[in-house]
């Protein structure tokens, strides 16, 4: 990589690490207030105002990561690559700083709430970390070949494979929680269940089983596509 790109990589890494610390600091405050004895499932009830604030905080985090990627990238592929890179570094260091500040998680198999949009995502900590490492790998491949002067564009089949892999990852994260909710209300009924009732049901949720098979298929699909992209780009530079 050129010196300019290495400098950009350094600054964006520091930015993403700082965002990871900021995110973990917010969680430290929330757990101190709501889980003084230590975080665990089932979740403590929260007010609508606090729940809405959390959702908007997550949305704001995505906007910040997207914005820095749009500023850093010179073309669509680079912008996409920098977004993947910053998101992944932020996510990994979020857990690193939680371990430093709270000595949590106890292990990489500890369950966590990963996201709240559009429904609750849950899974063992190692799962999002694995996805983040894959995102960094793909991002660095795209950045490296773009930096070498090659016009890098993802082909439609590659996009389709990446999107399918990403959707399967999301499905694996919402699988257990969604299954729990559907045990209490059918897919048809869920739209007519009063919000307070649905909220009360969600508060009794305790993670049971992560769908590892679905996650592994998703991860292999993402790695396979990343390998295809690398081989194609490598062939154009040899």
Image (cartoon, helix red, strand yellow):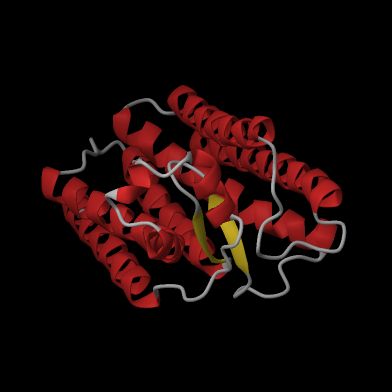
Between 175 and 74, the residue placed more toward the observer is 175
- Look at the image and tell me in which quarter the N terminus lies: top left
Name the residue located 38 percent from the left edge and 25 percent from the top edge.
74
Q: Nearer the viewer, residue 73 or 201?
A: 201
Q: Horizontal placement of 205 versus 219: left or right?
A: right
Figure check: 10 above or below 231: above
Q: Quadrant of residue 201?
A: bottom right
- Could you tell me which residue is drawn at 65 percent across and 36 percent down? 15
Q: Residue 64's spot in the image, x, y percent? A: 55, 28
Seen in the picture, residue 111 relative to 70 is either above or below; the reply is below
**Marker count (numbered):** 0
> Horizontally, is 53 left or right of 235 in the view?
right
The answer to whether 137 is drawn above or below residue 84 in the figure is below
Q: Position of residue 31 (x, y in %)?
A: 79, 51
| Closer to us: 209 or 184 | 184
The location of residue 209, given as percent across then percent down, is 47, 76
The residue sitting at 32% across, 71% down in the picture is 214
The reply, left or right, for residue 64 in relation to residue 150 is right
The image quarter in which residue 83 lies: top left
Toward the viewer: 82 or 168?
Answer: 168
Q: Residue at 25% across / 38% down in the picture?
A: 150
Locate the C terminus and report the quarter of the image it occupies: bottom left
């Amino acid at each position: 990589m050129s010196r300019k790109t290495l400098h950009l990589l350094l600054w964006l890494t520091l930015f993403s690490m700082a965002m990871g610390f900021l995110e973990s600091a917010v969680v430290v405050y929330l757990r101190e207030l709501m889980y003084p004895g230590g975080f665990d499932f089932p979740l403590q009830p929260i007010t609508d105002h606090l729940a809405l604030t959390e959702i908007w905080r997550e949305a704001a985090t995505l906007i910040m990561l997207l914005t820095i990627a749009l500023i850093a990238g010179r073309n669509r592929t680079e912008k996409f690559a920098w977004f993947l890179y910053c998101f992944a570094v932020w996510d990994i260091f979020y857990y690193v700083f939680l371990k430093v500040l709270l000595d949590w998680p106890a292990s990489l198999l500890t369950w966590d709430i990963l996201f709240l949009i559009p429904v609750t995502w849950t899974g063992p900590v190692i799962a999002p970390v694995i996805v983040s490492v894959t995102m960094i790998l793909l991002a660095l491949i795209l950045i490296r070949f773009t930096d070498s002067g090659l016009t890098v564009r993802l082909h439609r089949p590659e996009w389709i494979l990446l999107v399918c892999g990403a959707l399967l990852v999301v499905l694996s994260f919402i699988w257990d929680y969604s299954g729990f909710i559907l045990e209490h209300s059918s897919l048809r009924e869920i739209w007519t269940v009063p919000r307070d009732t649905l909220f009360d049901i969600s508060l009794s949720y305790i993670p049971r089983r992560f769908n590892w098979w679905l996650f592994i298929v998703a991860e292999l699909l993402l790695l396979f596509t990343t390998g295809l992209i690398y081989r194609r780009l490598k062939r154009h530079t040899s």
